[in-house]
Amino acid sequence: MGPIKNKIVRQQLYLKELQRRKKEKLEKRKDRAKEEEKEPEKKAARLAENVPETIESKRVYDETVLQDEPDEEVQAEIQDDEFAAYFNEERRFPKLLVTTSKRASRKCYDFASELLDCFPNAEFRKRTGNIEIHEIAEAATKRGYTDLIVLNEDRKQTNALTLIHLPSGPSFYFTLSSIQSAQEISNHGRSSGHIPELIINNFSTRLGLTVARAFQSLFIQQPQIQGRQVVTIHCQRDFLFFRRHRYDFRERSNRPDGIGTGLQELGPRFTMRLRMVQRGIWDNKKGEVFFESNAGEESDRRKFWL
């Protein structure tokens, strides 16, 4: 088509070539379908080879990835970590304190209120004066709280969450994004006050296990199933997606038993990204950093920490 000087003629020839290739491709697919119908093993072999590549499948090898079979070393570590008392039923009923950064806006307080509705046995205390986080943690420990959540705000936007396990840590710093309140979710439901079931999904490394155990320790171990409420924290590519739903049962005439199931979202919904883990109580200046991942410094999209 290069030597043809007329632009319109070149376009017509190009379109005809595209149509020819499309027709040829369709004929090949039809012939292959007929052949595979006679020999199903060929289709099975083709599908086995034709596996699409994803970022997850290209994941950089991490020696801390947990295996299906329990590792004795990992089991020994979690039996003696900071959350062992909760899983050994010594502290079966967690008590959570939620507060904010200094001089927070109404929007941050509203988000804190929605968090209180998600976590059983949680209380909110407004942060006043120049009291620091370590002072709040010390006072909360004396009053029997097992965990502390501090919501951070920047330019009247809630942008971070610090989770501190009391009395001696560890502390987790998450950035927040895509926050939606219950009122912003279409067809949302209302919570009933029952203790929810917790689903922790796709935490596959040793660090991920620690983060998962930190979230598990915020919930009472015996959910009230009659409430049909479930909180899900799903990890995908180091993003933690927080969702809360209620199981919904409705009449369905097209079902043999006449009952259909579904999910009704209760809210809120938001996304977290782990940026730092410190041993002990959170300290911006002198804290012992165990893990750190700064925003914008990820050198390899195939490297995941959780």
Image (cartoon, grey):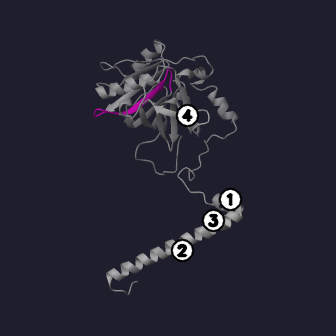
**Closer-to-camera residue (265/171):** 265
Q: Does residue 32 show up? A: yes
SS assignment for the magenta stretch, majority: strand
| Magenta-span inclusion, residue 159 | yes
Task: Locate residue 9: give its quadrant.
Answer: bottom left
For residue 66, side relative to residue 99 (left or right) = right
Counting residues from the N terminus, which is met first, the one under dot 1 or under dot 3? 3
- Gap in angstroms between the C-alphas marked 2 and 3: 14 Å
- Gap in angstroms between the C-alphas marked 2 and 1: 24 Å
Q: Nearer the viewer, mark 2 or mark 1?
A: 2
Q: Which mark is residue 24?
A: 2
Q: Mark 3 and mark 2 in contact (Cβ < 8 Å)?
A: no
- Gap in angstroms between the C-alphas marked 1 and 3: 12 Å
| Residue at 36% across, 25% down | 100
The segment highlighted magenta reads 154-169
Helix, strand or loop under label 2: helix
Q: Which quadrant is the N terminus positioned in?
A: bottom left
- Gap in angstroms between the C-alphas marked 4 and 1: 34 Å
